[in-house]
Amino acid sequence: MEQKARRRGNAIRAAVTVATAAAMVGVLAPAAGADPLPGGLGPCLGSSCPPSWNDPNNGPVVGFDSNINVFVGGDFLVREAAAEAEGKVVTLGEFDMNKRAGVSQVYNVGIAGVGSRVPPPDGSDYLTTGGDVTIADGQRLLAEEGEHSGRVAYAGELTGTVSPATAPRFDEDAAAPFTELRPQLTEASQCYAYDGDEHREATGTWQQVGDVMTFTGDGTSAIQIFDVDVDLESEAGGNTGFVFNGIPAGATVLVNVYGSTRSVATFMGSFPNEGLRENLLWNFPDATDLSLTGPAQFEGSVLVGQPTSSTVLSMSGTNGRFYTAGSLTHTSQGQSGGQEIHAYPFDGDLPSCTPDPTPTPTDPTPTPTDPTPTPTDPTPTPTPTDPTPTPTDPTPTPTDPTPTPTPTDPTPTPTDPTPTPTDPTPTPTDPTPTPTPTDPTPTPTDPTPTPTDPTPTPTDPTPTPTDPTPTPTEPTPTPTDPTPSPTDPTPTPTHHTPRPTHSPSHPGELPDTGSRGGEWIIGSIAAALVAAGGTVLVATRRARRRTF
């Protein structure tokens, strides 16, 4: 009883341990069906990414990021008093800079005086365009700061001044590696916002009170989704602030802003929520006309999905990735100036947009383990595991001499006809019984299998050197032994193997091969039959006695 109790206790403890481990895995597991942004966009790339990201500052460079910070599917225009775009910039269209007079005539690309201070690696492409680069007279595009500098790659024409002088480089395929990102971003933006024709189900709610918009999550979901179908501005139409509550640590926040014409006006600054900036995505799947304004440091990344869209960005600063499938105008409002795009990664996991794979057949074709012939081919083809006749076939065993002639029985010469397939095989009237699988394996002079055992077809391989050959105790033919001449009908791979038949000169007798074991074999068979008959007789008598 004690032992049973111990066993029962061990089983209970094991079950509790497994259940606890499963529960822990469930808590720590990421959300099912979560994917990053398409094309590898989002996170910092390279071996020099910083361990943490500071708020915008003008300190020293703290790392390098090879990923795209600004992607524009159309044209990238710089207007009014916009100042800089930090990080790697890619535009599939043209880059056109034409700032207003009376403001700084410089626009920085790649590295910025104020920002995350994580530019692209030195010597890499700070700006890549699929069209022209046009800089207005008297203005300069800078791809350098102090000891750090990069390149400006363009596929069209270059007009104006780019610094340093070594930065410009012509490449007609400069933007080719990035062209697929445009449709991918459009598809992703739709997927994040819609489930079929319906809005993707939200996990949280939002409320606008005065000039503060509060987003409240459910406190548990790994992807916090909000559905907004209005402009993001105060109740009076002015700038608003944003507050996020009920967001679990490390969760992704996805704000889907629906509508073809949308405006975001904000004075927001840094979030008190640690890590939220790198996990927040503002998604505009429908907007073809989008305006982003206000004296803000707009936290989080932006995705504009429509390829025909036009986005006007005049916020003081944005802190996150900026991806649009359409065109972008970086500008300023009124007398303000110094508008900046700062480089910060997006590290969140978003709803999966990858279709489920179609299952493939698990057994499309016959496997090598079933190489047997079909019913239309009655002649069995030897399988790779049985290239030669099996032990159940009445072929000679290694203990019997093979058909190779021995010195005591020379190979038939051209004057001694070789048995042909037309000679009849022994009939049941022959005195020698046909060997059965239980009988000793016949010698090469025994008749071959009856017509019920199909002879290998020309496609069957003839015996190869792997077939058993005479043992060292059996003499092999010497050079003096005559060998079949080319005219002998010796079986070749292209002919049927002839069945051994009785010699025409001695019908009804087995040819003498020089081996004297036949009599002993026949005697053994007879003795076995007698013993078997006696056994049957005794068994029958006993059965009768039991019956009576």
Image: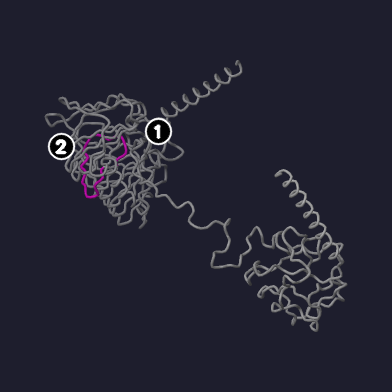
Query: Picture coordinates of residue 354 (x, y %)?
Result: 36, 45
Give the crowd class for mark 2: few <14, some 14-19, many >=20 residues within 10 Å: few
Query: Picture coordinates of residue 116 (x, y %)?
Result: 35, 33
Q: Amino acid at mark 1?
A: Pro
Residue with the mark numbered 2? 334
* Marks 1 and 2, the one that precedes in the sequence: 1
Give the crowd class for mark 1: few <14, some 14-19, many >=20 residues within 10 Å: some
The answer to whether residue 145 is visible is no
**197 within the magenta span:** no
The residue located at (28%, 33%) in the rendering is 225
Q: Residue furthest left?
A: 236
- The quarter of the displayed image where residue 80 is located: top left
The residue located at (32%, 51%) in the rendering is 129
Query: Picture coordinates of residue 437 (x, y %)?
Result: 72, 59
- The quarter of the displayed image where residue 410 is located: bottom right
Q: Residue furthest top?
A: 2
Residue with the mark numbered 1? 30
Quarter of the image for the N terminus: give it. top right
**313 within the magenta span:** yes
CA separation, marks 1 and 2?
46 Å
- Is 386 situated left or right of 50 in this image? right
Front residue (pair 320, 532): 532
Quarter of the image for the C terminus: give it. top right
- The quarter of the displayed image where residue 484 is located: bottom right
Q: Which residues are magenta?
A: 304-322
Q: Residue furthest front?
A: 548
Front residue (pair 220, 546): 546
